[in-house]
Structure formats: structure tokens, C-alpha cells
Image (spheres, coloured by chain):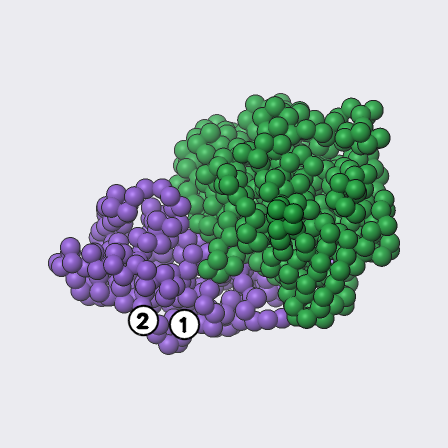
Amino acid sequence: MDASDRAPSSHDLSYPISRRLFAGTLPLLAVGLASCTGAFLDRTRFAEAFIVDPDWTAYRPILGGLIRIILPLDQHDFPKVPAEMIEERLISMFPLEKEQKFLGLQRTLTLFDQIDLFPIVSGPLLFEEEKARDGGTGAAELAAALQDADRRAYQEFTRLQPVKGRPRFQDLSIETQQAYYTLWRDSPSVVKRAFHSTMKTLIMTTFYSMDQVWPAIGYAGPLLGKAAR
Amino acid sequence: MTALRCDIVIIGSGAAGGVLAATLSELTGKKIIVLEKGGWFGKEFFDQREWDMRVLYADEGRQTTLDGAIPVRNGECVGGGTTVNFALCFDPVERVWKSWRETHGVNGFSFDPRAGDYGVSGLNMPHALAEVRQRINVHRASDEEINDNNRILADGCRATGIESKRFELNMRDCVRSGFCAEGCSYDAKQGTMVTYLSDAVARGVQVIHHCDVERIVMTKRQGALTATGVQARVRTSRAGSRVNSVAPGRLEIDAKLVIVAAGAVATPVLLQRSGHPDPYARIGRGVVLHPSLPIIGAFDRTLENYRGIPGTVYSDAYTASHHFYFESLFGHPVYGALVIPGSGAEHFALFRDLPKLAGFGVMLVDEARDRNYVEWSAADGKPRIHYQLSENDKDRLRFGAARAIEVMLGGGAREALIASDEPIGPRGLPRFRSPSESHFCSELQFLSHRTLLTSSHVQASAKMSDDPKLGVVNSRGESHHVRQLIACDSSSFPSSCGVNPMLSIMTMARYQGRRIAAELNRYGL
């Protein structure tokens, strides 16, 4: 089987924030930067998250953190599978680091990691947002609405779990990580919600396709007794 | 490069292509080639594992609407959808086909069993349907074939005062393994792979699988654009597939008649990619998906759910008034994990008791709207499915969700859930313990990526109409703009056919196959 054929079994990001698309959003981003010099630094970091491809090892802790909040690995009756094994399996099923089609997901992982960037709605995100909405609300209107909602949600989040400086997702406690992941679920941004549901899809698919977890959920598996391919 | 020559090339081997190949080989002596994008996997390949069997689906099961929100399942293997579906059979709905006469100028397709459409003796829908029903062994599920999950739907319907019905199935000697969607390991499901296509192959039809059709070749002949064959590329076969009839590499086929039966995603995309004229912007427009909302029930007792025949009970009590069905549905762990709302401990608290869960779907017969369309993207060569629910359809689904919650609780569930993490009702997630809570469903917004809708019935994306302003092909399935080119599959329906579409597609294909065989001189064959 061609390695490039491997893919998630269900709804994943079908609108990757790719390099090519990013090039198309440069003018929009420039306008965003010029009109909002106060937040210049944050916006630059935001834009960077869409341009810079860190080494794959930089993504691993983020992925590992997501696995721990989507699967309650520490619960006593949860199937005993080490997080590292799930991570390895996920990457073999969905080669995030190798394939162009996962580039958008990679980028969003980087963005997701920098939690203080959550309330910022900038050019590249808006571009993807408009595409995902498929001819809905106009750009300016959309930017205002998204920014307003995400800012309020983020304020509430930081009020409940104060964070200092420029925190990374990977450094938060599990409880705070969970609350932050929920922000992405509850956002009016389709792109953010898509990231939330895609991570659930990838991690659940990876985990519940493993024979060794089936006894814990009472699933007897195939009748034929053939080994997995 | 391989160059072949034939009379008729059929693109697709599913509900439409398989039946067309068998019918034309039965009734004509013509040389026929069938091209299939997916592999030819026999029962020995089907290992009853969800992840492995993703290869039977378009884009390995990851095809979605453009916003990534609705998984759109299409069989992509020899037999197409008939290899991976739940074998649910509904006769073509006479009311719908007759309405197309008025609304879309679709002629023929008589439901009078004495009719001979186009002057062809015996050419009518009841005759075609009877032949198909017999060949694929359509029969009503028996009492002992109803598993607990289906019985719960029947019980719930009874408790809430609505009627439930028994599905008809195209199976023979089913062993009730519960692995329909992974391909039948027992050849019990009578899809086209084990019926019509095998008949066609026995009569000398050549099947080329792992075949990407790049374009239909169209040339000007006597001033008219005419289909003269196809250009394709044959991929290396996936391990476990049957041996192919040609070597991997470029493939060019000269054919006198080209029939497209690639399904409602691939057919419009192939027409667009081939440069098929589209002066009225009809190709791909008005696609319908039959979006389905999964309903989950948590019980206090162990049930037979993932074993047994997945679908034997349904209800059409609200179909006339609200355009939806309740259809029994259950899956295996990956599907189950994605349908259960939430994550972390809350998710596992429900999912750890998989044998105590029940499920059915609210399947909506959605409106055909031009703003929903399938298009080919030159950028990555993949289809884009642009789809948004209409406000009317959302209202119907809200009503359907509320009734479904009542049915699930009426069937004995301790708790009923929707595959959604919208904050509906008193428990954060949409979890309901009393029928009096069902009214909260009116708050559902069907936000993408928060409420899961799934689709397995794409239709109506290259519609039939005798008016070229309304359709891509005429009632014979002939292109309005390209000679010697016919399209015949679920894309041909002007709107939803009103039911799970397999039998409607197969009946139409049998009908068109008979018609083509009787009108060969119309195509210079």
C-alpha cells in the first residue's frame, strides 16, 4: 500500500492551511498587521505559526498532551496502553509529519500550543474560515464576530485558570488543558471546531482500532479470527 | 500503455454499473469493458476490521463535505456501495418518480406493468424491479433475524404510538455476523459483485479495477461533440485484490458508447474534468446527501447490538410530514467512539459499556438546492462537496431528534443521547433521561464539528431532465451536449429518490440497460 494513501477514517480537516494557500493570504495578512500595530507582536507570532515548520519533535508533546485529555489514561479501569504507544500508532496510521495533506493540521497544532494567541483572529485564519463557511458571512463581519466571542471566552478561561507570560499548552496541568481544549470546541470559528473534532477523530480511531482495548469495552471483535493487516 | 477497443465502456461497477454490464451483456452480443476505481476484493479479503476495511471506501473513508463536517461514505471497490451497505431495500417510490415528470420533465419510467416505454415491449419500472428483486434475493427480514438493537427501535415506536416496519434485505443465507459495512465475508449480501457483475464476467465482460478514469475523450464528429472513449491510468493493485486484467500504467479505450455510472460524487466530477459542456451550470448542482443524525441509547442490560443483522427495523411514520426516517443502525468500536459525544472520562463512562448501547439514525430526505454542489478541484484533483443544510431541513431534524429521543427512551433506554456536543438540555451534553426533556432538541443548531451528521446516500448531482436547462442528461440518460455518452446512477435522480437508494438505482439501471439493448441502432451499435 502506498503510504500516502493512509488517512483518517472520518471527518478530518479537509481544508488544510497549506503553504500555497498561505501565500494567497499575504495581502490580507499585511492589512491586518498594518491596522493593528498594538498587537503587532502577537500577530507576527500568529502568522509565524502558519509559516514556520518546526521539526516534528516539536509537535510530539502537543500531541501527547491531547492524547491524555481525550483518553482518560490514568483512570484505573481504562485499558492500560502507554501514551507513547498510542502516539506511535497514531503517527503510523496518520503520518502527520510526512504528508502534505496534514500540513494544515500541523500548523494548527503549533497555533493551538501557543494559548495566548487564542483570541487573535488574523488573516490566514480568516481566509480558512471563509472557505470553510462556503459563501457565508463576509470577512470583516466575520473577523469582528469571531474575535469578540473568542476574546470573551479566553478572558473567562484565564480568570478561572490564571496563566502567566506566554504559556504553552504542553506546560499546563491536565485540568487546564481540558478547559483550553474545550475553548476550541465552543468557538464560533469553524476552523477551531474542526481542529477539536479532528483531534478527537484521530485519537479515538487510533485507540479503538487496537485489539487489546476491546475487552475493556466488551467488544468481542471479528468472528473470523484473522490478524489485522 | 494499454490500448483497448470495445463497443461499450461502463465506468463504475456498483448498483448502476454492475446491473448495466449484466443487462447489456445478456441482451446484446457487444464487447463490454467495466472500469472500477477501487480494487476487486473477494470475501477472503474482508477481515471484519473497521480500520483495514476503510480501503473499500472513497478516499479511504475520509471523504467529507468541504467544511470537513459531514463524512460522506461511498463504496469504492468492485460492487461499489452494494459491497459495503447494510443491504437495505426499498422499492422505487412511484410518487417520487411521477413527481419528477411534472417538476423536472422526466419521461418514461412508467409504473404501469403493461407499459412499453419508447415502444419497447415490457419496458417499465415494475418489470425491471421484479427482475432485480429476484436476482438479488430481496426478501423481508424474519422475526428471528431481529436483534436487540432493532427490537428496541420497534418497542420505542410502539411505546410512542407510531408504526415501525420491517426492512427488506438483499441477502442469501446471512450468518448475522454484523459486519456488513466491512464487506460480507460470507458472500451472503447479494451486492452486484456477487450477482450482476459475476453474471457479466461469465458472459465475457472485462473488468479493469484500480482504474482512475482521467477523462472521457470527446471529439467533434459531423459537427457534434461525441464521446469516443476514455483515457485512464491503472494503478498497481493493492495487496489482497484479485489480479487485474491489464498491467498498471496508461490505458486508452476506444468505445462506441460511453456509460458513466461512477456514483453521485465521481460522475459529475468526471464530466467536469472531461470538459463536458455545461452552458446552464447544471453539472454537480443540487446534490442531496440524506444527512443522518445518530441517536444513542444507554441501557441497564446487555444487548445484542454489534452482532446480528444491523438493519431490520425502520419507521416512516414521519416521512410524509417531516421527510425523515428512523433507521436502525449500529457499528463497531471506531464508529461508536466517534458517535458518542464528549471525550475523556465522560466519554469512557458511556463507551465502556458498548454492549449496553443501542443506536438508530434520523435519516433526512433533504431538499435539492442549487447552492449545494459537487465540483472538481483542479488544484488537488479531488471532489469538493459544498453542502449546507437548509433552514427547513434543520427544523425537520430538530423535530426528528426530539421524537427520536422519545422513541429511544420509550424503547427502554435509561438515557438517550444525540451525537453532538452542543450544550443542549440540563446535562451539558445532549443527554436526556425523560421524554419531557425532548423539547430541548429545538435548541439544536447543527453546528459543524459539534453535531455529527453522516451521509451514505449522495444523489442528484447530474440530473435527468428532458429540458437541458434543468438537467445534464435526458430521460434516456443521454448527455444533452455530447453524443454517445450516457450517465446512469444516483446522480441522475432530479432530487432524492425518497428512500435508501440502492434498489431505485438498480431498477433504473435495469430499465436503461433494457432500453439501450432495444435501441442499439440509436447508438450505431
Residue A60 is marked as 1
Q: Residues within 10 Å of mark 2 (few under 14, many from 20)?
A: few
Name the secondary structure under disc 2: loop
Say which chain tag 2 marks. A
Q: Is residue B113 visible?
A: yes
Percent position of residue B172, x then y: 83, 46
* Chain B pictured colour: green
- Residue appearing at x 68%, y 71% in the figure: B1
Q: What is the distance, in whole Å, between disc 1 and disc 2 at their CAs?
A: 16 Å
The tint of chain A in the picture is purple
Label 1 or label 2, whichever comes before in sequence order: 2
- Which quadrant of the figure has residue B412? top right
Position of residue B25 measured from the top left corner of the image (x, y, whole percent): 83, 49
Q: Position of residue B453 (x, y in %)?
A: 51, 43
Residue at image point 65% right, 50% down: B221
- Tell me the kind of residue under disc 1: Arg
Circle 1 — which element? helix
Q: Nearer the viewer, mark 1 or mark 2?
A: 2
The one nearer the camera, B496 or B321, is B496
Name the amino acid type tagged 2.
Val
Mark 2 — residue?
Answer: A52
Residue B269, given in percent of the width and then of the height, sits at: 56, 51
> What subunit carries mark 1?
A
Residue B285: in sight, yes or no? no
Residue drawn at the location 56% of the way across and 66% of the way down: A6
